[in-house]
Image: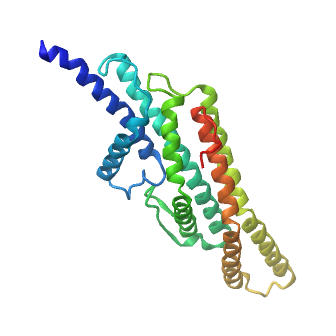
Amino acid sequence: MTLNFLEPVLLEGLAALLWPLCRIGACLMAMFIFGGTTVPVMARALLALALTVCMLPNIPALPPEPLLFSTEGILTTISQVIIGAGIGFMTQFLAQSFIIAGQAVAMQTGLGFASMVDPVSGTNAPVVGQFFSVLTTLVFFALDGHLVFLRLLLLSFTTLPVGPEIFTPQQLSYVFYFGATMFQCALAMAISAICTMLVVNFTFGVMTRAAPQLNVFSMGFSVSMVTGLLVLWYCLTAFMGNFSSAINALLESSCSLIGTSCSGLW
């Protein structure tokens, strides 16, 4: 009799911890900073557990149903993983927009020959793209962007209560919309380098027609490299403006994804 009495109490307490842990852990797994291969899995799991314990007092009370190991309970667990991964995945757009911009600048200026292994994806990427990625990460932490998204994750428990429901098609449309915004931010960051190198290459083309005896291949590569470094320097002066536009668009899309307002969030 005692065990039969304690079983629903234990399952209810386990569900109150497990379902928020699934959402928070999935969010950390998909975030562009905490989800990289440089963060050990054990450290990520302990961080998710610590955040869950800290957020539990502010998480709305769970409904008595469904049971943890029932069919509806399994669907609830899957939905929490999907919601958490969706919120964390939105932050990937912020990093990828500047990585794409850096790769575009590197390819246009001839700096794409220098590449290194991306610690997040594990593939080779131009150093310029990695530089923008590191700079984005540092600015994101300096502006407490990680705290803003943890607060947004906590708000999701109110707007999207624990249950088998997931995002609606209208909410998912904001993810695809911000995917287009990511390329717009990358193009805005790299458009100056693209236009500048187009003028430089056009100039070398005119020089080749005017003086065929000039060795454009040997001279043009060095000039392109120096011009690329100057263009990269000027691109950095507009970095904060592009970052501000990208983070504001990201917050608007993330708030729309979970169905809340961004007023007073940052």
Left or right position of 99 against 221: left
| Residue projecting furthest to the bottom | 213
In this view, the residue in front, 217 or 126, is 126
Q: Residue 113 in the image: x percent, y percent? A: 56, 72
| Residue 187 rendering spot, x and y as whole percentages | 71, 57
**Figure label count:** 0
Judging from the image, the colouring scheme is rainbow
Image position of 256 with respect to 32: above or below: above
Closer-to-camera residue (36/242): 242
Residue 81 vertical placement versus 229 (above, below) = above
Q: Residue furthest top?
A: 1
Location of the N terminus by quadrant is top left
Q: Residue at x 20, y 19 (%)?
A: 7
Q: Is residue 216 above or below residue 165?
A: below
Instruction: Name which residue lies at 71% across and 81% down.
Output: 220
Please, which residue is most extreme toward the front here? 57
- Residue 76 location, quadrant: top left
State the image quarter where residue 37 is shown.
Answer: bottom left
Q: Nearer the viewer, residue 173 or 129?
A: 173
Name the spot of residue 191 as percent of width and height, x first: 74, 62
- Height in image: 254 above or below 244? above
Q: Residue at x 77, y 73 (%)?
A: 201
Q: Position of residue 203 (x, y in %)?
A: 82, 77
